[in-house]
Image (tube, rainbow, N blue to C red):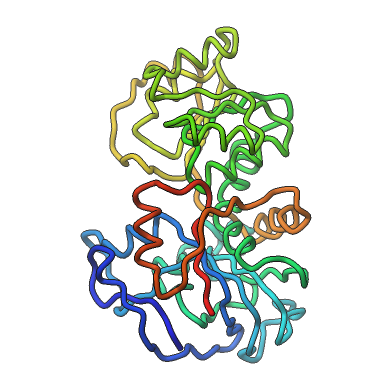
Amino acid sequence: MKATLFRRHGGPEVLEYTDFPTPQPQAGEILVRLRAAALNRMDVLVRNGWPGLKLELPHINGADGAGEVVALGSPLPEGEGSGVRVGDRVVINANLGCAKCEFCQNGWDNLCSDWHLLGETIRGTYAEYVCVPARQLYKLPPEFNFHAAAAAALVYQTAWHSMVKRGGVKAGETVAIVGAGGGVNSASIQVAKYIGAQVIVIGSNQQKLEQAESLGADILIDRSKEEDWSKAVFIATEKRGVDVVVDNVGTTFPMSLRALKKGGRLLTVGNSGAPRFEIDNRYIFAKHLSILGSSMSTLADFVEVMELVVAGKLKAILDKTFFLKDASAAQERLWRGENFGKITLEIP
Ligand SMILES: [Zn+2]
């Protein structure tokens, strides 16, 4: 098969569009002919590498993908993927639990003791073919676009699990979202609006804020003009503060803690800024704040949120599409933050 892979860690120049052996489905696995893949920041971090990261090289990036089922490794476990047939159009859930440990058995497969993320710890979707366990597939309706499906999978399951399952965001609450451009943030805006919350978006420039507004954001704060945006949040909420802050930047935690009302919740699924920063503990205890972390979602959440995506109630925002062979240019665009929503790869 054709794949874009890397044989050593480094910059975009290490990506190579080349031939690689087509994976063969093991028992319980499905071979998918990918038609679209979507990019995530993690792809670039994995390509760059970090101390202690040990991957079987060459490695293939890519957590998100959609395509057609071409072969079933038999036998499929009982009740699992029994509905999947050759020719089905599917989107992949990249959160890989073992299905056996105590967490998986209790439906918390994103806490699996042998957890893997497609494209991060094992070879992913920047390729013509990929093998995944049958339970990782969600069947798409015939007319649903592969790019829209691939672009939705990781960001929507992440936003849904964090906001609905961990954060318990409710109708009528006010949610501030720090950052407007990233895939999880644009998904978070739509999830919050779908639930019936009021949404404040803190964005880095006017263009990104206008795009956030087009997704339903109610109040826009431009942090290039309002350096202390927690003050702007207070003014916008009549000095009450917000119920929930979605902060996937990290370094903005001090400001997010200030922007919360008493008893508020800070939700986080990542750190596009940096992982280490100082916070003032006094805000947490004096205001009874909760900090709730999460990562990816459960198999059940994935189905729940994909139902809303195929029904058109939640939509992945598509930025730009590149061919698989041009994945390095695609990653460069993502890393420079030039995108609004998801960058995808066309896999001819
Ligand atoms: Zn497990």
| Quadrant of image for the C terminus | bottom right
Q: Is residue 29 visible?
A: no
Q: Position of residue 270 (x, y in %)?
A: 42, 45
User: Which residue corresponds to the image point at 50% horizontal and 23% vertical from the top-left?
Assistant: 221
- Using the rendered view, name the quadrant where residue 153 is placed: bottom right
Q: Please tell me how many numbered marks the rendered image carries.
A: 0
Q: Is residue 172 visible?
A: yes
Task: Pick whichever, 324 or 69, lies toward us.
Answer: 324
- Using the rendered view, name the quadrant where residue 12 is placed: bottom left
**Residue 257, placed above or below residue 299:** above
Q: Is residue 131 left or right of residue 277?
A: right
Q: Is residue 327 left or right of residue 128?
A: left
Task: Pick whichever, 263 or 227, lies toward us.
Answer: 227
**Residue 102, placed above or below residue 232:** below
Q: Is residue 190 left or right of residue 328?
A: right
User: Which residue corresponds to the image point at 35% horizontal and 66% vertical from the top-left?
Assistant: 328
**Residue 161, placed above or below residue 101:** above
